[in-house]
Image (cartoon, rainbow, N blue to C red):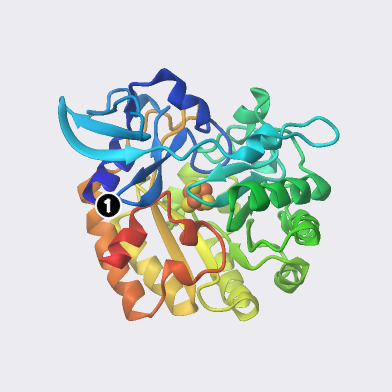
Amino acid sequence: MELISELQSLGLRLDDPTAGAQSRRGGAGPSDHKAVTVDGHTVMIPVHTAGSWSSPYVATQPGADGASRILRDGVEVGVVSFPRQPRFYKMQTFDGIPYGKIATLHGADVLATTILQSCIRYESRRKSCQFCAIGQSLAAGRTILRKTPEQLGEVARAAVLLDGVKHMVMTTGTPNATDRGAQILCESAFGVKSAVNLPIQGQCEPPDDDAWFRRMHDAGIDTLGMHLEAVTPEVRKRIMPGKASVPVERYMDAFAAAVEVFGRGQVSTYILAGLGDSDDAILGMSERLIALGVYPFVVPFVPISGTPLEDHPSPDAAAMRRLLSPLAGMLEAAGMRSGDAKAGCGKCGACSSLSSFERK
Ligand code: SF4
């Protein structure tokens, strides 16, 4: 667990230059990461960030058994492995789009996609979330702007059949200030569920009308993520000036309404530690969320190259321990576990060491 927290905070240098080819760069949400299996847990570790280039941790070239030694100042501190490249990456749609541009493998067994690779918040850097790189992977040609329901169904089916994917995360840029992505999530979930029975987490901002929760559920979305990112109004305004126009209290109302539809523990939120919120603020908000039945997925902020926050440091492992240890206690007291979610980031857990604190 300690090594996971250290690697997530400091990043990892790769001794094998070809190993980076299977990692993801840019995009929405946590990025510039590579999946690494440490002590049997697959986690996302920063490998392309500026900070990771000066990380004291180096992964040696994998041996014949696929294992790679982790060295700190030349001393071996652990052994990891890198999940093999998914088989579905070798395929392409009937219209010639490589499957890997439609969805990617996250963690060990999660299929992840950004169904709409643009966002009303991203049109101007004055309004955009300062950590987000949703336009970068599109500009670099690593993805396509809009994934159709048919394409998503086709790729999901292949990922289940060829790679044993267990659940799917669908996020989206915010297309408008009304349903805020709920409608496009409905269409996409319907497309996937028509092709394969795969649990889906939808992720969007709170829509303007709570009726969308029932519609999303009925379209095939099993769990819902609505991501606060930061919890205090000042930090939200500074870090995400556009998205902060939807106030925290609207999120809280939306969480309560969504839990009624999706169930306790099946609604979650991402909270990025290290952007200015105090531990008390994050833990206080987590307490409110847990009382509502919402899983607070607290992850260390990791800067993405090319964003306004690219030089902002990640919280160190000790800071994450101070936060995640009491949070795990709160979750345990409430009987809420990441593993009970049907799908989504909390269940995957690869972007935070929270679930290892839960296990502890
Ligand atoms: S926690 Fe979410 S964003 Fe992170 S690897 Fe898993 S599915 Fe992807």
Name the residue rendered at 59%, 58% in the picture. 167
- Quadrant location of residue 297? bottom left
* Residue at the extreme front: 64
**The C terminus lies in quadrant:** bottom left
Q: Which of 44 and 242 is in front in this view?
A: 44
Q: Is residue 189 visible?
A: yes
Q: Is mark 1 on a helix, strand or loop?
A: helix
Q: In the image, residue 327 lies at what x, y percent?
A: 31, 66
Name the residue rendered at 66%, 42% in the picture. 103
Question: In the picture provided, is 21 more to the left or to the right than 102?
Answer: left
Q: In the image, residue 279 lies at what x, y percent?
A: 28, 58
Name the residue rendered at 33%, 54% in the picture. 353
Q: Which of 232 and 169 is in front in this view?
A: 169
Report which residue position mark 1 lands on.
320
Question: In the picture provided, is 79 more to the left or to the right than 305?
Answer: left
Relative height, residue 161 to residue 31 (above, below) = below
Q: In the image, residue 335 lies at what x, y percent?
A: 38, 80
